[in-house]
Amino acid sequence: MTVVVTGASGHIGANLVRTLVGAGRQVRVLVRQQERALEGVECERVTGDVLDPGSVDRLLQGADVVYHLAAKISLADRDDECSRVNVEGVRNVTDACLRHGVRRFIHFSSIHAFSPEPVHGIVDELRALNVEGDLVPVYDRSKAAGQRIVLSAVSRGLDAVILHPAGVLGPFDFSPSRMGRVLLALAHGRLPGLVDGGFSWVDVRDVVSAALAAEQKGRRGEGYLLSGHWCSVREIADIAAEVTGRRPPILSAPMWLARAVAPLAMWGADRLRVEPLFTPASLHALRNHRLTSHEKAQRELDFNPRPTRETIADSYAWFREMGMLRR
């Protein structure tokens, strides 16, 4: 039976597709333009976009299981495309799943779909979702809105399970991801300073293992938080230094100062036509969702995130293998 993956060229998608193909599954993916992450992978490709109902309909012909990862991560204050992809794209895919009688739908939401309030409370699957008007980044609101669409589809008969990964690190990071670029910047000595704050980091391979378990054992309509281990930015830099031998930056900006200069940094990056590593939205992430619980995923999906140091070491090994890490 055919397994469909959207967002297959992303970080999680590249790992998921390889795992599915390696297990002998018949995999079909939706691609737009970027296919570097799928080079050499034996899978069926359908060219299209989740915002195009026609291509989504072609994609789901004869599909048994659908993993929906296609999303746009945005660090802007306003991003209409982010809202369309993460909301209307979800609607297009879930509607098509219902039309085609898909047996199981695995939806990748995010830890960012959960409200940051209360700041000092434990974040688990019972935490309220963000709503429109909340003072949170557009990405956070869009992922919550997309999740509500999935839950609505469940009420109409879709057998869906929802996953909420935290900050993802690990190999097969082709783009690379924002945190992948941070790791490379640390290894190449191109990060002048750090910021206070931190996040819960999880290995992409552990996320994929949980997704496969969710296909088999996840309960219909249930969500599972896939958090890992909370590490500060300084701790990440220190681990990177142990692995690469490159001394980490000495300076760390307090959060209040980083937040004050972030708009100026974004303005400068826009002028230089580069993407900044730290923005108001990324700083928002680094000061929220600190206390997390993945007990439900551990109990029901056998989810056991590996140590962050192992993940970072394996990330650098892969970057080196791909020629992205200078000696």
Image (cartoon, rainbow, N blue to C red):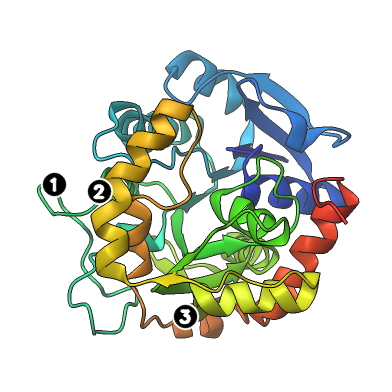
Three-letter amino acid code at the position of disc 2: Arg
Residue 85 rendering spot, x and y as whole percentages: 39, 31
Asked if residue 130 lies left or right of residue 98, the reply is left
- In primary-sequence order, the first of circles 1 and 3 is 1
Q: Residues within 10 Å of mark 2 (few under 14, many from 20)?
A: many
Residue 235 is situated, as x and y percent measured from the top left of the image, at: 56, 80
Q: Earlier in the sequence, mark 2 or mark 3?
A: 2
As helix, strand or loop, the secondary structure at mark 1 comes to loop
Q: CA distance from mark 1 to mark 3?
A: 26 Å
Tell me the element at label 2.
helix
Image quadrant in which you'd find residue 130: bottom left
Return the mark for residue 10: none
Q: Which of the marked residues, 1 or 2, is nearer the chain's N terminus?
A: 1
Looking at the image, do the residues carrying marks 2 and 3 touch, with CB atoms under 8 Å apart?
Answer: no
- Residue type at numbered disc 1: Glu
The residue labelled by disc 2 is 141
Task: Determine the secondary structure under disc 3.
Answer: loop
Kind of residue at disc 3: His
Q: Which residue was labeled with disc 1?
A: 132
- Residue 205: horizontal and vertical position, in percent? 70, 64
Which residue is at a point 33% across and 48% down the rendered structure image? 143
